[in-house]
């Protein structure tokens, strides 16, 4: 909290040394969220690259799409420094601990040989989480956080290497089960794409019994957790909508999703239920009750903001398979305020730092999606704090 502004300013200073003109821009945030009014003024917390004309048109403005281009820019900036060396295809495999501190790291070179890199100031573990390691997901997280979820991490390198290297030399780690950043809108492969966004936004979340189970316009994480709490850890849940809610989903998308076995259609709730494996009678009652709420403007079941959605008025009903989607794990090695890793006796392991999703002490059991920017934001800030302390001792 204390250093995030300073870290952002430093980052912009580094980006200014690049040739492409990247600009860190605040994201506009509304004064209330999901119908729940803010009782105090909101502090702008989320940043993007909205004002960076160098981004290609298909990059979008969200950090998840533009981030790779920013990383490439930072790589070019790093090459300007003669005292900084970048090594690729050289994974760390083991920390070197001598006495009370870490003095280096063993790496595997591209030719298969091993070498040692000595560290006069410290080693910073910035290896991410372990969501791409199924064995660690089973060992360290709740079954409902992975049992029926798909996986959305374009890095493919988040296998918990930093966690395991730290544990091997006596580091302390967050207690299990550890928090997972999970979102709604998952399909069996990954995320549903933008063609489905309106349908999902306006539709209802329905379980196999044909009943609603969550306020659909809550933050992604809350909806995902509610789905994972359904029988079978959320298996067999659907987004139900009609043709008036699906702007952006054309006939080609409908046929594509039907061909994948993800989308079902019916002229009545009963017909749709039979096609999708949902209790059709309950679904009919659910839709009828939901439509009735619009007359009074109050969702008496879940208090959804009806002013931002619509009732079912169409003649074609659809059920789109849905599941949660894992983005990252949020548990890691125990650190102090300088990002120094602690051992099992709460003593600092000199020379060892952990940042981002390799570090712990931040999320208590759950990732709070209603607070924007806490994952990438802490990765940036903690990296800055760790490097400052390693180099300057402060």
Image (cartoon, grey):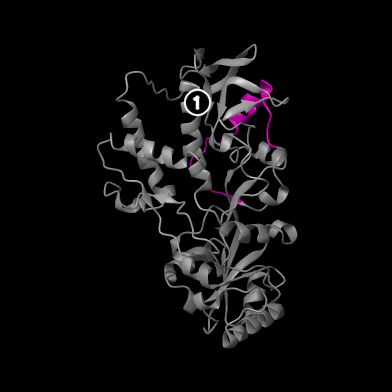
Give the residue furthest to the bottom: 295
> In this view of the protein, which residue sits in the foreground, 285 or 19?
19
Secondary structure beneath disc 1? loop
Give the residue furthest to the front: 40
Residue 330: image x %, image y %?
61, 42
Eyeballing the image, is 298 above or below 215? below
- 9 lies left or right of 291: left
**Residue 153 appears anywhere in the view:** no
- 345 lies left or right of 154: right
Q: Residue at x 38, y 36 (%)?
A: 10
- 373 lies left or right of 72: right
Eyeballing the image, is 194 above or below 314? above
Q: Residues within 10 Å of mark 1 (few under 14, many from 20)?
A: few
Which quadrant of the structure image shows residue 283? bottom right
Residue 18: image x %, image y %?
28, 35
- 178 lies left or right of 90: right
Residue 204: image x %, image y %?
59, 72
Query: Does the magenta segment cover residue 129?
Result: no
**Residue 311 appears anywhere in the view:** yes
Q: Residue at x 34, y 53 (%)?
A: 50
The residue pinned by badge 1 equals 394
Residues drawn in magenta: 150-174
Q: Residue at x 54, y 60 (%)?
A: 260
> In this view of the protein, which residue sits in the foreground, 153 or 333?
333
Most prominent secondary structure in the magenta stretch? loop
Which quadrant of the structure image shows residue 233? bottom right
Query: Does the magenta segment cover residue 157?
Result: yes
> In this view of the protein, which residue sits in the foreground, 162 or 245?
162
């Amino acid at each position: 909290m204390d250093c995030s502004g300073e870290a952002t300013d430093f980052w912009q200073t580094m980006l200014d040394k690049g040739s492409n003109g990247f600009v860190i821009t605040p994201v506009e945030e509304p004064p209330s969220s999901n119908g729940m009014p803010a009782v105090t003024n909101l502090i702008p917390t989320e940043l993007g690259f909205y004002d960076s004309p160098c981004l290609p048109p298909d990059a979008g403005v969200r950090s998840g799409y533009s981030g790779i281009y920013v990383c490439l820019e930072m790589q070019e900036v790093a090459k300007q420094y003669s005292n900084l060396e970048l090594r690729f295809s050289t994974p760390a495999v083991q920390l070197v601990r001598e006495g009370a501190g870490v003095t280096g790291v063993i790496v595997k070179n591209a030719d298969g040989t091993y070498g040692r890199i000595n560290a006069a100031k410290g080693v910073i573990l910035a290896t991410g989480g372990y969501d791409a390691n199924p064995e660690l997901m089973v060992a360290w997280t709740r079954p409902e956080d992975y049992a029926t979820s798909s996986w959305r991490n374009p890095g493919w390198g988040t296998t918990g290497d930093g966690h395991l290297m730290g544990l091997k030399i006596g580091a302390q780690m967050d207690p299990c089960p550890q928090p997972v950043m999970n979102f709604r809108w998952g399909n069996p492969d990954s995320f549903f794409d933008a063609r489905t966004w309106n349908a999902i936004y306006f539709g209802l979340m329905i379980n196999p019994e044909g009943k609603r189970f969550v306020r659909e316009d809550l933050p992604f994480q809350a909806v995902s957790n509610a789905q994972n709490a359904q029988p079978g850890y959320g298996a067999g849940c659907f987004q139900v909508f009609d043709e008036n809610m699906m702007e952006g989903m054309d006939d080609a998308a409908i046929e594509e999703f039907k061909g994948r076995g993800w989308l079902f259609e019916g002229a009545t709730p009963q017909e749709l239920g039979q096609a999708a494996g949902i209790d059709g009678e309950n679904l009919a009652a659910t839709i009828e009750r939901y439509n009735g709420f619009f007359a009074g403007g109050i969702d008496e079941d879940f208090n959804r903001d009806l002013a931002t959605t619509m009732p079912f008025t169409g003649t074609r009903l659809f059920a789109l398979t849905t599941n949660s989607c894992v983005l990252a794990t949020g548990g890691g090695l125990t650190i102090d305020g300088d990002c120094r890793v602690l051992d099992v006796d709460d003593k600092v392991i000199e020379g060892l730092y952990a940042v981002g999703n390799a570090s712990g002490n931040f999320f208590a059991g759950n990732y709070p999606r209603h607070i924007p920017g806490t994952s990438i934001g802490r990765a940036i800030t903690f990296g800055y704090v760790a490097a400052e302390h390693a180099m300057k001792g402060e």
